[in-house]
Image (spheres, rainbow, N blue to C red):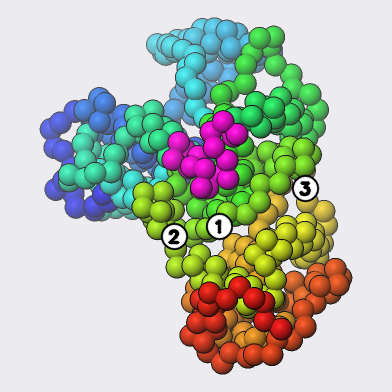
């Protein structure tokens, strides 16, 4: 909880003062930095006060003047070939005025890509100071008020909650396969995933890695099986990358990178995950579905609009058509992105699989309804309720040439519906005979 009232600051309790730069991993904007300090305050029972140097003023840092300068002077001309050499060189620093230095190697595992949710950050016992509270604040040893949200850092519960959520996301209704079926591709694709990761690292470095023999790379945040599962959720259009990142409390770039790598491996093996029957736009919807099997309103609406009486084809044929057009839609999106960028993607960059608002199969359904002249775009907008008219117009404009290219432009239907209620009533009909 953020508070600027000075009366909450401890007067006599022992505390720790930390001075930090404005940017970097300990910058004043980063939630992970403050969350881990809150965990340290709770563990040590110390009030931790942080004072950030304003931007472009880190030269005021006395530690850099009185410590780092002597360390740099001491190791001048000496190749730093290993951690032991670095530690010995730093620890050997001495001055005539009495400066001595101790150095220890931290062998802890610190995975990258961690993020802190807004709810958990709001629960931190953080007190802003009256003067420049964005740069000066204190983290109290305990939460300011009782709360169900944990305030500790990554090593104190967040990782466990993430593992629990991942086990729930492996639900067959979302992945399209049970645990046994999911384990088979995970085992088969693990070596290829490692090769793809190594290829990306080489592209980013511009060559092979140079590291000491036996030196192991840091443990990734997600294992191979989890990477496959998360990629399947995204390819099946269960939810967006941003929603996955928010739920797992990691950065969107972390999810995007693993999806980009694993997707290429799945595509090389011609794995077709298909589409999930339900799409989710919020974490609340997704968790409610896992608990009660309650699908969002959008899912039931699209199921009604996919009725053969409206689309002119069976649901099986409609799903097959959506899968056939999916690669072309992806290529079309990439061409549009290329035109906006004016060049190819940079090595290691990622591209999306499906639009955020409307999925591939939904796009085909909406285009068919409009091209069959069953209704107007305003009626479709009213029926869906959570999509704008311009989004539906863009969808129709993009899908129509794909249908024409495949020779699948539908003939006009004999009935036209003037309202969303009439259109949905026709879709609820028990008659599965396609309209002519």
Residue under pointer 2: 295
Position of 349 relative to 308 (above/below): above
Residue under pointer 1: 277
Q: Which is more N-terminal, label 3 or label 1?
A: 1
User: Gap between marks 1 and 3, in whole Å?
Assistant: 34 Å
Residue under pointer 3: 346
Image point 44% across, 28% down: which residue?
63
Which segment is the magenta one? 166-182
In the image shown, does 317 or 30 lie closer to the viewer? Answer: 317
Local SS, label 1: loop
Q: 44 left or right of 21?
A: left
In reply to whether residue 325 is colored magenta, the answer given is no
Magenta-highlighted stretch: main secondary structure?
helix
> Where's residue 362, x and y in %?
62, 67
Q: To which quarter of the image does residue 144 belong?
A: top left
> Where's residue 241, x and y in %?
57, 51
Q: Pointer 1: residues within 10 angstroms few (<14), some, or many (20+)?
A: some
């Amino acid at each position: 909880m953020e508070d600027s009232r000075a009366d909450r600051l401890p007067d006599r309790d022992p505390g720790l003062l930390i001075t930090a730069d404005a940017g970097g991993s300990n910058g004043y904007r980063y939630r992970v930095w403050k969350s881990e300090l809150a965990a340290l305050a709770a563990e040590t029972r110390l009030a931790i006060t942080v004072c950030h140097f304003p931007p472009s003023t880190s030269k005021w840092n006395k530690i850099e003047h009185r410590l780092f300068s002597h360390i740099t002077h001491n190791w001048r001309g000496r190749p730093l070939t290993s951690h032991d050499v670095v530690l010995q060189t730093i620890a050997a620093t001495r001055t005539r005025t009495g400066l001595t230095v101790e150095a220890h190697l931290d062998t802890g595992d610190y995975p990258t890509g961690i993020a802190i949710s807004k709810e958990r950050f709001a629960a931190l016992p953080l007190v802003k100071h009256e003067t420049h509270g964005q740069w000066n604040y204190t983290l109290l040893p305990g939460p300011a008020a009782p709360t169900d949200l944990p305030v500790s850092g990554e090593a104190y519960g967040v990782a466990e909650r993430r593992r629990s959520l991942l086990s729930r996301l492996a639900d067959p209704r979302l992945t399209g396969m049970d645990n046994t079926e999911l384990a088979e591709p995970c085992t088969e694709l693990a070596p290829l995933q490692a090769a793809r990761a190594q290829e990306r690292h080489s592209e980013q470095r511009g060559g092979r890695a140079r590291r000491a023999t036996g030196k192991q790379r840091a443990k990734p945040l997600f294992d191979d099986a989890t990477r496959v599962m998360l990629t399947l959720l995204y390819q099946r259009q269960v939810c967006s990358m941003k929603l996955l990142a928010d739920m797992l409390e990691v950065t969107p770039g972390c999810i995007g990178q693993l999806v980009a790598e694993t997707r290429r491996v799945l595509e090389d093996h011609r794995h077709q995950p298909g589409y999930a029957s339900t799409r989710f736009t919020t974490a609340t919807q997704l968790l409610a579905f896992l608990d009660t099997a309650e699908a969002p309103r959008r899912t039931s609406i699209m199921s009604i609009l996919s009725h053969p009486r409206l689309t002119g084809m069976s649901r099986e044929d409609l799903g097959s058509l959506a899968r056939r057009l999916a690669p072309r839609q992806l290529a079309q999106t990439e061409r549009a992105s290329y035109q906006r960028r004016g060049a190819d993607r940079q090595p290691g960059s990622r591209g999306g699989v499906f639009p955020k608002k409307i999925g591939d199969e939904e796009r085909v359904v909406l285009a068919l309804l409009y091209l069959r002249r069953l209704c107007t775009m305003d009626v479709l907008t009213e029926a869906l309720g959570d999509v704008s008219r311009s989004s539906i117009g863009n969808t129709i404009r993009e899908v129509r040439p794909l249908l024409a290219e495949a020779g699948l432009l539908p003939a006009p239907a004999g009935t036209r519906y003037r309202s969303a209620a009439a259109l949905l009533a026709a879709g609820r009909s028990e008659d599965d005979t396609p309209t002519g």
